[in-house]
Image (cartoon, rainbow, N blue to C red):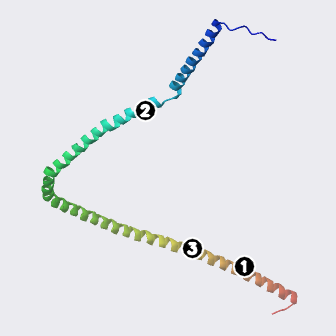
């Protein structure tokens, strides 16, 4: 039989000490885990900061810019439109006349260029047709001379053939 020693007061204190320390250790491990892996508090702080920066500062800048643009537009509307109308009434007719003169000059230059192109095109086409005609005539002359040469050869062959035939048949004229 196994004999266990009796528990004394020191042993009970030790067991209580261990159980209290285990609870503290578990609590510390939970805190460490929360600090390492639970980012919710950090993220919520960053999100609040971003929203504050974006909504407060940027919206104020945007509103200020819109008011500046509105002021400029009303200033232009009140002062500059009349000046622009007056300046356009004075300068647009002369500008229009100058543009019409420039367009007519450009059209005359284009017409002269077109005439020049057509003249050169005609001469180049004439020269091209003349060269093609000379090539055609040379080609036909060569073919006719070949036909004549072939005809002469065949005529000689036929004369020799019939002369030989007459000789073999003893036909005399």
The C terminus: image quadrant? bottom right
The residue that appears at 45% across and 32% down in the rendered structure is 43
Secondary structure category for the residue under label 1: helix
Label 1 environment density (alpha carbons within 10 Å; few <14, some 14–19, many ≥20): few
Q: Residues within 10 Å of mark 3 (few under 14, many from 20)?
A: few
Decide if residue 140 is on the left or right side of residue 89: right
Circle 1 residue: 153
Mark 3 vs mark 1: which is more N-terminal? 3
> Residue under circle 2?
44
Q: How many marks?
A: 3
Residue nearest the viewer, comparing 20 with 163: 20
Residue 32 position within the rendered picture, expressed as x and y whole percent measured from the top left? 53, 22
Q: State the CA–CA distance, disc 2 to disc 1.
A: 113 Å
Question: Considering only order in the chain, which callout, 1 or 2, is on the residue closer to the N terminus?
Answer: 2
Reading the image, the residue beneath label 3 is 138
CA separation in Å, label 3 and label 1: 23 Å
Cα gap from disc 3 to disc 2, whole angstroms: 98 Å
Closest to the camera, between mark 2 and mark 1, is 2
Which of 12 and 84 lies nearest the eye of the viewer? Answer: 12
Q: Secondary structure at mark 2?
A: helix
- Spot occupied by residue 45 in the image (x, y as percentages of width and height): 41, 30
Give the vertical position of 135 relative to 4 (above or below): below
Left or right? Give the position of 58 relative to 22: left
Q: Residue at horizontal 50%, vertical 24%?
A: 35
Q: Position of residue 129 (x, y in %)?
A: 48, 73
Residue 110 at what x, y percent from top left? 31, 65
- Which quadrant of the figure contains the N terminus? top right
Q: Please, is residue 21 above or below residue 142 in the view?
A: above
- Residue sitting at 54 percent across and 23 percent down? 30
Q: Residues within 10 Å of mark 2 (few under 14, many from 20)?
A: few
Circle 3 — which element?
helix
């Amino acid at each position: 039989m196994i004999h266990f020693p009796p528990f004394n007061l020191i042993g009970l204190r030790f067991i209580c000490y261990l159980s209290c320390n285990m609870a503290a250790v578990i609590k510390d491990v939970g805190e460490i885990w929360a600090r390492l892996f639970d980012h919710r508090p950090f993220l919520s702080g960053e999100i609040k900061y971003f929203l504050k920066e974006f909504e407060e500062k940027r919206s104020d800048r945007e509103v200020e810019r819109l008011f500046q643009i509105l002021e400029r537009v009303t200033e232009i509307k009140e002062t500059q439109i009349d000046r622009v109308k007056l300046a356009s009434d004075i300068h647009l007719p002369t500008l229009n006349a100058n543009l019409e003169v420039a367009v007519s000059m450009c059209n005359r230059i284009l017409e002269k260029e077109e005439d020049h192109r057509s003249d050169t095109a005609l001469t180049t086409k004439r020269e091209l047709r003349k060269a093609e005609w000379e090539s055609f005539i040379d080609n036909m002359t060569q073919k006719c001379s070949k036909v004549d040469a072939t005809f002469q050869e065949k005529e000689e062959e036929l004369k020799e053939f019939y002369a030989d035939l007459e000789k073999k048949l003893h036909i005399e004229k």
